[in-house]
């Protein structure tokens, strides 16, 4: 009996973003070692199984990313009315969103180098995950996000910079609420 470990990995790139997939499959080959052709055939079967499983995972990912193609082109939005949150100055850098020049990749940047393009799907998914960890419903999470950003905003309307600020804040809150071991 021979123990076989098959490992495959694949990188899928789109719009300068990439996602890696890997799969390790372990199994036993129950053929006599004195028949090398049969051993190789059984190992090929394990590789084929691993390849098929990896293809399914990549297809599932591409299916989900096809649904969320909003990252392909930044949506045009009206400039938000400037508002101040209590004691913080987070919204002043977001008040001139549409008057800023675009970079070659379609992103809008402010004079401080801030990025006004839409938050990525990964940022939004992580926000939703943090909200669940904190026991917040989606409306409660959006309300908390509005408090942090200083304006009423839906999760999918956040910029990359705003999402980063909210993620930092919620992560800090999660750490503060987690008991130390």
Image (spheres, rainbow, N blue to C red):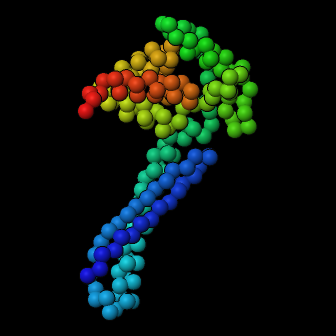
Question: Residue at the spot x=38%, y=63% of the render?
Answer: 24
- Could you tell me if residue 142 is visible in this image? yes
- Could you tell me if residue 79 is visible in this image? no
Asked if residue 158 lies left or right of residue 97, the reply is left
**Position of residue 13 measured from the top left corner of the image (x, y, whole percent):** 57, 52
Most extreme residue toward the front, as rendered?
A: 181
**Position of residue 141 measured from the top left corner of the image (x, y, whole percent):** 38, 22
The correct choice, above or below, for 38 with respect to 162 in the image is below
**Position of residue 140 measured from the top left corner of the image (x, y, whole percent):** 36, 20
Asked if residue 101 lies left or right of residue 66, the reply is right
Give the total number of marks visible in the rendering: 0
Most extreme residue toward the bottom, as rendered?
A: 34
The correct choice, above or below, for 102 with respect to 17 in the image is above
Q: Quadrant of the N terminus?
A: bottom left
Question: Residue at the spot x=47%, y=61% of the render?
Answer: 9
Question: Residue at the spot x=37%, y=23% of the render?
Answer: 173
**Position of residue 132 measured from the top left corner of the image (x, y, whole percent):** 33, 30
The correct choice, above or below, for 15 with respect to 131 in the image is below
The correct choice, above or below, for 139 with respect to 21 in the image is above
Asked if residue 169 lies left or right of residue 137, the reply is right
Q: Quadrant of residue 34?
A: bottom left
Q: Nearer the viewer, residue 155 or 27?
A: 27
Question: Residue at the spot x=45%, y=46% of the render?
Answer: 64
Asked if residue 106 lies left or right of residue 144, the reply is right
Q: Quadrant of the C terminus?
A: top left
């Amino acid at each position: 009996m021979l123990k076989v470990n098959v490992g495959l990995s694949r990188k899928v790139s789109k719009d300068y973003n990439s996602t890696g997939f890997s799969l390790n499959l372990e199994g036993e080959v129950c053929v006599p070692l004195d028949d090398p052709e049969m051993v190789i055939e059984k190992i090929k079967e394990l590789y084929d199984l691993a390849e098929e499983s990896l293809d399914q995972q990549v297809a599932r990912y591409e299916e989900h990313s096809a649904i969320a193609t909003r990252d392909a082109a930044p949506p045009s939005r009206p400039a938000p009315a400037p508002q101040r949150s209590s004691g913080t100055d987070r919204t002043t850098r977001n008040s001139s969103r549409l008057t800023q020049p675009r970079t070659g990749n379609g992103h809008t940047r402010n004079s401080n180098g801030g990025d006004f393009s839409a938050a990525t799907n990964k940022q939004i998914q992580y926000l939703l995950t943090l909200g669940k960890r904190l026991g917040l419903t989606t409306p409660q999470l959006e309300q908390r996000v509005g408090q942090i950003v200083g304006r009423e905003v839906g999760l999918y309307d956040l910029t990359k910079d705003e999402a980063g600020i909210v993620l930092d804040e919620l992560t800090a809150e999660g750490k503060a609420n987690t008991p130390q071991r």
